[in-house]
Image: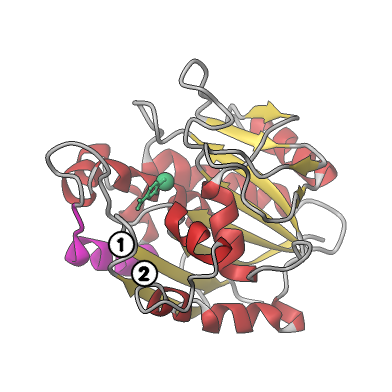
Amino acid sequence: MAKITAGIFTSHVPAIGAALDLGKSTDSYWQPVFAGYEPTKAWLREREHRPDVVFLVYNDHATAFSLDFIPTFAIGCADQFKPADEGWGARPVPVVQGHPLLATHIAQSVIQDDFDLTVVNKMDVDHGLTVPMSLMFGQPEAWPCRVIPLAVNVVLYPPPSGRRCYQLGRAIRKAVESYEEDLNVHIWGTGGMSHQLHGPRAGLINKEWDNAFLDKLINDPEGASKVDHLEYMREAGAEGIELVMWLVARGALDPAPAHVTRRFYHVPASNTAVGHLVLENAR
Ligand code: DHB
Ligand code: FE
């Protein structure tokens, strides 16, 4: 049977992708950011940790979906997802290979479990998805695994609640673990941590709140799922709401993680506090 063995959590700052693509990852500003991901990259290179499929929870930033049309939760069931042109041409990264059979199995299971996903059969993927891929896998010719994208609306009010995201994660785990093929599946939660890109509070970073959120996400995920919109907005900035996506991934993992394999937090990186966790399920 397929099994969710680990969850990876990371910010998805677009400037991180640009730094990598433009050969600036060893510049003094970026070096500590990339260094923070080295232990995870090494862990992922070990045979038993390499995923066959990543279920990647991210948000589209009005790239594939315009502001005319935004599903709350959209699952990518296509064969392939091309890197999107976000205004400067597509990133020079591989095309993402999907897993239509597992994706449609998950869609069926989760929708019949009362979560109304939108099924997407054609979609380009923006920095929300490609930057986490680059952070974990570097710059290969082809990505080493298949990816099922789950796009969550956090750009047009109202976003889904953290509680709903957490419960969706549990339904995703049930769906994955009822798929017959033996597959090592990861679930990734991306976006966050504290950041605000516009208005008088632009540049807001809240290290104390972010670190308390990491503690809670690890040790008290139910409690973390109860954080409401206004708290994210007030404490972590308007774009801090991206953290609800981490709760989808957390919901698909054991309530008490078997292993906290990696924890990393770093400021500065563009306008965002960079947070990163790897949590493993019991084997
Ligand atoms: C930045 C962060 C984001 O999450 C994003 O989507 C766009 C920009 C930033 O830090 O600049
Ligand atoms: Fe973002």
Magenta includes 205?
yes
Residue 11 vs residue 199, the one in the foreground? 199
- Residue 273 has which mark? 1
The residue under the point 78% across, 37% down is: 78
The answer to whether mark 1 is within 8 Å of ligand 1 is no
Q: Amino acid at mark 1?
A: Ala
Query: In the rendering, at what x and y percent does residue 92 appear?
Result: 66, 54
Tag shown at residue 202? none
Residue 128, placed above or below residue 121: below
Residue wearing tag 2: 219
The local secondary structure at tag 2 comes to helix
Is disc 1 placed on a helix, strand or loop? loop
Q: Is residue 100 visible?
A: yes
Say which residue appears at 49% left-offset and 44% top-offset.
Answer: 167
Determine the CA span between mark 2 and mark 1: 21 Å
Q: Quadrant of residue 143?
A: bottom right
* Quadrant containing the C terminus in the rendered view: bottom right
Q: Residue at x 53, y 82 (%)?
A: 38
Q: Main secondary structure of the magenta part?
A: helix
Magenta segment: 204-219
- Toward which corner of the image does residue 109 lie, by quadrant? top right
